[in-house]
Image (cartoon, helix red, strand yellow):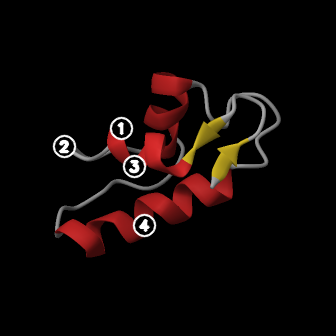
Amino acid sequence: MVVCHCKAINAEFIKNLFAERSFTVSDVTEECGAGGDCGRCLDVIECMLEQSPMERGTPVLVGVS
C-alpha cells in the first residue's frame, strides 16, 4: 500500500525504517520525507506507528514535536 503519494513511499518501506528502534512521525519524515510535503499521509503514518508495538512488543513514541 502506498502511504505517501508525494514521495511514492509504501507501508513496507516505512515498517522497515522502524523495525529495529522506536520512531516518531517526525523521525519518519526526516528519514524518508514521507509526510513532509502535503501532509495527507501523517495520520496513516501515526496509525502505523501506534500498531507497530503491538506487533513486536516495543514501545514507540507517537506524535510530532
Label 2 amino acid?
Answer: Glu
Q: Residue at image x 69%, y 33%?
A: 8
Q: Is 50 or 13 nearer to us in this picture?
A: 13
Mark 4 or 3, nearer chain start: 3
- Point out which mark residue 50 bears: 4
Q: Secondary structure at mark 3?
A: helix
- Between the residue at mark 2 and the residue at mark 1, the CA separation in whole angstroms equals 8 Å
Determine whether label 1 and label 4 are within 8 Å by CB: no
Mark 2 or 4, nearer chain start: 2
- Point out which mark residue 15 bears: 3
How many residues crowd around disc 4 within 10 Å: few (fewer than 14), some, or many (20 or more)? some
Q: Which residue is mark 1?
A: 17
**Nearer to us: label 2 or label 4:** 2
- Point out which mark residue 20 bears: 2
Q: Secondary structure at mark 4?
A: helix
- Between the residue at mark 3 and the residue at mark 2, the CA separation in whole angstroms equals 10 Å
Determine whether label 3 and label 1 are within 8 Å by CB: yes
Residue 27 lies, with reference to residue 40, above or below; the image says: above
Label 4 amino acid?
Answer: Glu
The spot of residue 26 in percent (x, y) is: 51, 36
Label 3 amino acid?
Answer: Lys
The spot of residue 13 in percent (x, y) is: 46, 40
